[in-house]
C-alpha cells in the first residue's frame, strides 16, 4: 500500500498533507509513504524529518505518485496534476467543488476516487476528521492577531501612571468555529467583545465566553439553523433589520471580524460601504470570507486596503496557511483519522466500505463518474 504526498502547487499554499507524526502512523499500518522533495518546507518540515519518520523522498511529483494507491493533498489537484494521478487511486483533499464542476469531472475522467474532506459530516465519530473545524479554529485565532497588528493600539485596558488606556472594542460577525475562537482570543487579549449570528444556539455560546450577543431575535431568527448546524440564508427583510441593528454598532467598534459563510454559496454581504465610512480612522475590518466574495463590500482578496476615511480592511487569503506548521499538523491528523478507517489492519491493505456514511458523504468520484448527489448528473 503506497501513499503519496506531492507538494502543493496552487496559489501560495504553505500547508502540507502529512507530517512526520502521521508518516509514522501510516507506516505502522503497513504503508509505504513517499513525499515529494520540499513538500513540507513552507510548514517548517525538512525532508530529513520525513526520512527519519520512515518516508521515502521523491525528487518529483510524478515520481512520488507512481504506483500510489492513496494520494494526500491540501488542495484539489490542479489540471496539470490530474494527468499524473494513478488510475484507481484514492485522492483526499479539500476539493472546493462548488463552481468547479469541470474540475470535478476531470477527476472522474482520470478514474480516481476523489474525496472532499470538507464534506465530512459533523457527527461524533467524525469530529477528529473535521478539517473545516480544525482550520477555521486557527483562522479565527489568526484573524484577531492580524487585526491587532493592523490596529496599532493596545487591546486591553491598562492603568498607568501616565493615564488609562481604554480597552479595544471588537465585534465578531458569524459565530461558527472561527468566530468562537476569535471571541475567545480577543477576550484573552483583554478586548471588550460583542458578537452576532443568525443561529439562536450561538447566543449561549457567545455569552459563555464572556462576550455580549447582538441580533434581531424575531421568529425567523428562532428557525435560522439547519439540521447540520449551519446557518440558513436569511430573508431580505431579516437582513435589512439585522443590518440596521449592526450599522450603529459597527460605527463604535475598533476591530470588526467577519466569518460568515454558507457552504456552496457566495459569502453574505454584512458590511456595506456606508458602514465602513461610519467607522473611526484607524479601525480595522478582518474579512475571513474574502475568498468567497467577502462579507465586507470593500474587501479586496489578498490585500490590506485602506479606505479614504482611514479604515483598514484585511483580506488575507488562506488564513490557516498563515500558521502553516500548526494548521498542517491538525490537517494531517484529520486525514490520517479518516484514511485509517479505510484500511484493513490485519491484511494491511485498502478495504473501503462504500456504504459507510463518512464515505458516502465525502466521495465525489468513483469508477470514472461523478457520484456525489450534489454534483452527479441528474437522471
Image (cartoon, grey):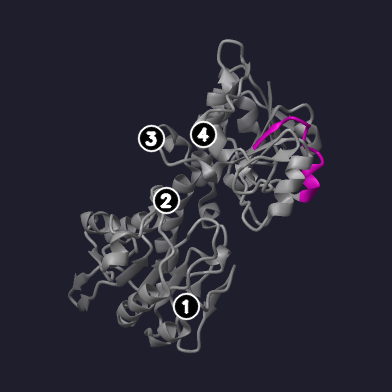
Q: Are marks 3 and 4 in contact (CB under 8 Å)?
A: no
Q: Which residue is mark 3?
A: 124
The image shows residue 144 at horizontal and vertical percentages of 39, 62
Q: Residue at x 42, y 75 (%)?
A: 236
The nearer-to-camera label among 4 and 2 is 4
On residue 187, which mark appears? Answer: none
The nearer-to-camera label among 1 and 3 is 3
The nearer-to-camera label among 4 and 1 is 4
Q: Magenta residues? A: 79-91
Q: From what the image shows, is residue 304 above or below residue 21?
A: below
| Mark 1 / mark 3, whichever is N-terminal | 3
Q: Which residue is mark 1?
A: 312
The nearer-to-camera label among 1 and 2 is 2
The image shows residue 168 at horizontal and vertical percentages of 29, 72
Magenta span includes 85: yes
Q: Which residue is mark 4?
A: 358
| Mark 4 / mark 1, whichever is N-terminal | 1
Q: Residue at x 25, y 72 (%)?
A: 167
Relative side of 242 to 308, left or right: left
Front residue of this view, candidates 339 and 184: 339
The image shows residue 192 at horizontal and vertical percentages of 25, 68
Q: Residues within 10 Å of mark 2 (few under 14, many from 20)?
A: many
Corner quadrant of residue 316: bottom right
Amino acid at each position: 500500500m503506497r501513499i503519496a504526498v506531492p507538494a502543493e502547487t496552487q496559489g501560495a499554499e504553505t500547508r502540507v498533507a502529512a507530517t512526520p507524526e502521521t508518516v509514522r502512523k501510516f507506516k505502522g499500518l503497513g504503508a509505504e509513504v513517499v513525499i515529494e522533495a520540499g513538500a513540507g518546507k513552507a510548514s517548517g518540515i525538512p525532508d530529513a524529518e520525513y526520512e527519519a519518520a520512515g518516508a521515502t523522498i521523491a525528487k518529483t511529483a510524478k515520481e512520488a505518485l507512481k504506483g500510489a494507491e492513496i494520494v494526500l493533498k491540501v488542495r484539489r489537484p490542479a489540471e496539470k496534476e490530474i494527468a499524473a494521478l494513478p488510475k484507481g487511486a484514492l485522492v483526499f483533499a479539500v476539493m472546493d467543488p462548488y463552481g468547479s464542476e469541470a474540475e470535478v469531472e476531470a477527476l472522474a475522467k482520470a478514474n480516481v476516487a476523489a474525496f472532499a474532506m470538507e464534506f465530512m459530516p459533523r457527527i461524533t465519530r467524525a469530529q477528529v476528521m473535521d478539517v473545516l473545524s480544525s482550520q477555521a479554529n486557527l483562522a479565527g485565532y489568526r484573524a484577531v492577531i492580524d487585526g491587532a497588528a493592523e490596529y496599532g493600539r493596545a487591546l486591553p485596558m491598562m492603568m498607568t501612571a501616565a493615564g488609562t488606556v481604554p480597552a479595544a472594542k471588537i465585534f465578531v460577525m458569524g459565530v461558527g468555529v472561527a468566530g468562537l475562537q476569535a471571541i475567545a482570543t480577543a477576550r484573552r487579549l483583554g478586548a471588550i467583545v460583542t458578537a452576532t449570528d443568525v443561529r439562536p444556539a450561538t447566543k449561549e455560546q457567545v455569552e459563555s465566553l464572556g462576550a455580549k450577543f447582538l441580533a434581531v431575535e424575531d421568529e425567523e431568527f428562532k428557525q435560522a439553523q439547519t439540521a447540520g448546524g449551519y446557518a440558513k440564508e436569511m430573508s431580505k427583510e431579516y437582513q435589512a433589520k439585522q443590518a440596521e441593528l449592526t450599522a450603529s454598532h459597527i460605527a463604535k467598534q475598533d476591530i470588526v471580524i467577519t466569518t460568515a459563510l454558507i457552504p456552496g454559496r457566495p459569502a453574505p454581504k454584512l458590511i456595506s460601504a456606508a458602514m465602513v465610512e461610519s467607522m473611526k480612522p484607524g479601525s480595522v475590518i478582518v474579512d475571513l470570507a474574502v475568498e468567497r466574495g467577502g462579507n465586507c463590500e470593500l474587501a479586496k482578496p489578498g490585500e490590506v486596503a485602506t479606505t479614504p476615511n482611514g479604515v483598514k480592511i484585511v483580506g488575507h487569503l488562506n488564513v490557516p496557511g498563515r500558521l502553516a506548521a500548526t494548521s498542517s499538523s491538525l490537517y494531517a491528523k484529520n486525514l490520517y483519522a479518516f484514511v485509517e478507517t479505510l484500511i484493513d489492519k490485519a491484511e494491511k491493505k485498502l478495504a473501503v466500505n462504500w456504504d459507510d456514511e463518512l464515505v458516502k458523504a465525502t466521495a465525489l468520484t468513483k469508477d470514472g463518474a461523478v457520484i456525489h448527489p450534489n454534483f452527479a448528473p441528474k437522471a
